[in-house]
Image: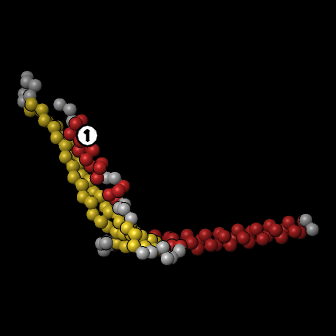
Amino acid sequence: MSMENPVKSTLDGLLKVLSMDNVIGEPIESDNKILIPITRVELAFGAGMGQGGSEEEDGFGASGAGGGATVAPVAFVMVDKSKEGPDQIEVIPLTSPDPLNKALCDISEIALEFLKEWQEKQKKSEEKHEKMKEDVEDLYNP
């Protein structure tokens, strides 16, 4: 007995649930704002096959597969057209964050600030280097 048909049909059904349209919803426009719904998709899947009867007989074979999915809204991404830069985008969670997620968000904010400062220092360093290069060229090419 082949497990291919029950497994294939169950997986096909689960894959329909797991499309990007179900994770990132259709944008909703209102005045100067765009809301993009974000959901969490959880999938479970199982399959089995058995053979009954004795060794002398062919016995009776059976197979089955099953699965399930849940789709739950978790947040909205809001894009404010009246603003520019990073302030234009805001994530609005629909659930209270658990301690681990809050810690990860805090760490990512600190890392982004560090990265921004580092980029500014790099830019200043490059400008200073370019100025020094021009000064040296001016010295040797009067």
Q: Residue at x 35, y 66 (%)?
A: 37
Q: Horizontal and vertical percent for residue 8?
A: 25, 40
Q: Image point 13% across, 35% down: which residue?
A: 62
Q: Residue at x 53, y 73 (%)?
A: 85
Residue designated by label 1 = 8
List x then y, in percent, for residue 99: 33, 73
- Left or right: 63 with respect to 71? left
Front one among 4 and 106: 4
Q: Quadrant of residue 38?
A: bottom left
Judged from the image, the secondary structure of the residue bearing numbered disc 1 is helix
Q: Which x, y percent locates residue 61?
A: 12, 32
Number of numbered discs: 1
Does 142 sit left or right of 65 as displayed?
right
The answer to which of 20 and 117 lies nearer the viewer is 20
Query: Which sits in the foreground, 125 or 87?
Result: 87
The answer to whether residue 42 is above or below residue 122 is: above
Q: Which one is nearer the viewer's eye here, 27 or 87?
A: 27
Note whether residue 66 is visible.
yes
Of the residues shown, which amino acid type is indicated by label 1? Answer: Lys
Q: Residue furthest top?
A: 56
